[in-house]
Amino acid sequence: MQDSFGAAFGRLIKRKRAETKTTQGQLACALYPNLDAEEAEKRKGDISKLETGKVANPATTTIKRLSDALGITDEEIDALQHRAQMSPKDQLENISALTRDQLELLASRFEIETPHTLSEGQLQQLLTQKAKEYRSYRTIIENIDPRIEATHNLKAAAQHAAEKLDFDEVETLLSRVAEVEAEIFSSTQEARAQNALLRNRPDQAFQIFTAAAESFRDIDVDQMAIRRNSYFKDLYNHGLRYGGTGLPRAIEIIRPAIDALQNTQNQRDWAAYTQNLANALVDQGIRTDGPDGTALLAEAVTAYRDALTVRTKVDHPVDWATTTQNLATALQEQGIRTDGPDGTALLAEAVTAYRDALTVLTKVDHPVYWAGTTQNLAAVLRNQGTRTDGPDGTALLAEAVTAYRDALTVLTKVDHPVHWAGTTQNLAAVLRNQGSRTDGPDGTALLAEAVTAYRDALTVRTKVDHPVQWATTTQNLATALSNQGIRTDGPDGTALLAEAVTAFRDALTVRTKADHPVDWATTMKNLALAEEAIADHDATDAPLPHLHEALSHVEDALTVLDPEHTSYDHASATRTRDRILAEIAALDG
């Protein structure tokens, strides 16, 4: 599948011919100057063969005559020849030098669907990530241990021991043979599984990983569990990055490891694996709508509580505090999903868990962890505040603001610029909540303060140094600008909304469908909401174009937010789409 010079030259001919509005017949006349025009016209099929890459190595004369006719420079030909000589491995190391066609061809190697729908920049970003994964994959292959000869020696020694009727020695040697063969088998399987992940096939990788881990079950159960936990991380990270079935498969692969260690002496690993399971359940629960998502979160809470039976405050205080904090996060997600008093109770339980964790993660002994947990506490206080009416809700939001400001006494811009930026962004979010529920100038001032805080965070979270975080903050800034625009009358309001649309589009330059599909879809849905807000604004004279833009964006989002893997977000986007369709129908009617 390496891109030949002839194929690349053919695409260049086709592009240049389109630019110069030259027909194939006219180009045939240039290629065959010794023929009259009528005879040359009959040879235009030769041009077609060149354009489709059927001529792998065009003659030097052909290249010269066509280049002269189409204005193709020597530099362009040299570049084509250089790129044609690059192997796929070399191409992965020189992604910025590849043509659009080469990028698409390389993407097809990784079985990326519809690469032609991605921009050149998106393809470059996607392939840059794949190049990192490929390098790790190559390392795995290179490290497959050539231990075949060692097994032959062990088997020969076992035969010698058998001849002496030394059956204990035979058993020792053959058990070592079994271990070495299992290690060789698992190394090969791991390379195969990474191959599958490179090609975005998590289900296939799961099957191969499972076989690799199970090869150790009868030899060393702890080793089987260790490998399942290692493979869990590969599937988990793939699921977070690319969506699909990675997270469910990660959950599935870790369960037997936990079961195997349940009643063994290795309780510390059992607790660590149980926490890993809980983390994946939380992530999958967040992406899953309805009762299924709630059930996943409930199972995560149970798993965290199970881990805490080993990770006790007395014996493992820091591990206990970490797991307690993770439990609080799961309770918080449950609370967000649960209406009424039950949801309020879950959020209150999350607050208690965070405060418990802070009894170990103190500002004096663990200042950075204290600050992180304090801002997590602020987040749940914010959630309590946003769902609580009246003065009680206002007080909770104020408490959240205080907690964020407390965290910033440790997470300073000078000492911890990245964490400072993250906490400043979270502070901005609470200020936005306060502003949204506060009438008049005070509310407007709070929203303006939120916008300022987001912009402050962006002084550290730059696109160059922290592209993913920059995109997140830029999207949140866009949301705050949208809130301002909705409550601001006249042209000033639509100007703020337009600024929000621009910020959402900026975020999408990093939150691409290829690299961050779920985040991309979320931003597309928010962009749709901003366009809908412009359509509904009192200063908008022509709402329909904005509604159609909004509809297009939310439908794009739904190409990723599927009901199986992201059912919660899928349901929300579907409601948004249906509402926009109803607005369009009302205006058209």
Image: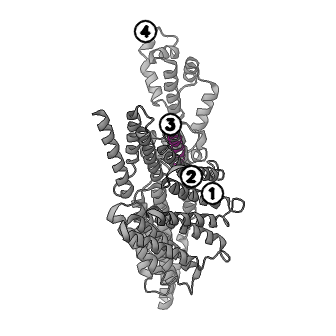
> What amino acid is at disc 4?
Glu
> What amino acid is at disc 1?
Ala
Q: Which mark is residue 473?
A: 2
Question: Does 460 sit left or right of 101 as displayed?
Answer: right
For the residues labelled 3 and 1, the Cα–Cα distance comes to 39 Å
Where does label 3 land, which residue?
Answer: 101
Q: Compare marks 4 and 2 and give the one earlier in the sequence.
A: 4
Tell me if residue 512 can be seen.
yes
- SS state under label 4: helix
Q: Compare marks 4 and 3 and give the one earlier in the sequence.
A: 4
For the residues labelled 1 and 4, the Cα–Cα distance comes to 71 Å
- Magenta residues span 497-511
Q: Is residue 500 found inside the magenta-colored segment of the image?
A: yes
Q: Which mark is residue 38?
A: 4
Where does label 1 land, which residue?
Answer: 421
Specify the quadrant that holds the C terminus: top left
For the residue carrying disc 1, how many other residues have a C-alpha within 10 Å: few (<14), some (14-19), or many (20+)? many
Give percent across and percent down for residue 544.
Answer: 37, 34
- SS state under label 3: helix
> What amino acid is at disc 2?
Thr
Q: Compare marks 3 and 1 and give the one earlier in the sequence.
A: 3
CB within 8 Å, label 2 to label 1: yes
Instruction: Determine the main secondary structure of the stretch shown in magenta.
Output: helix
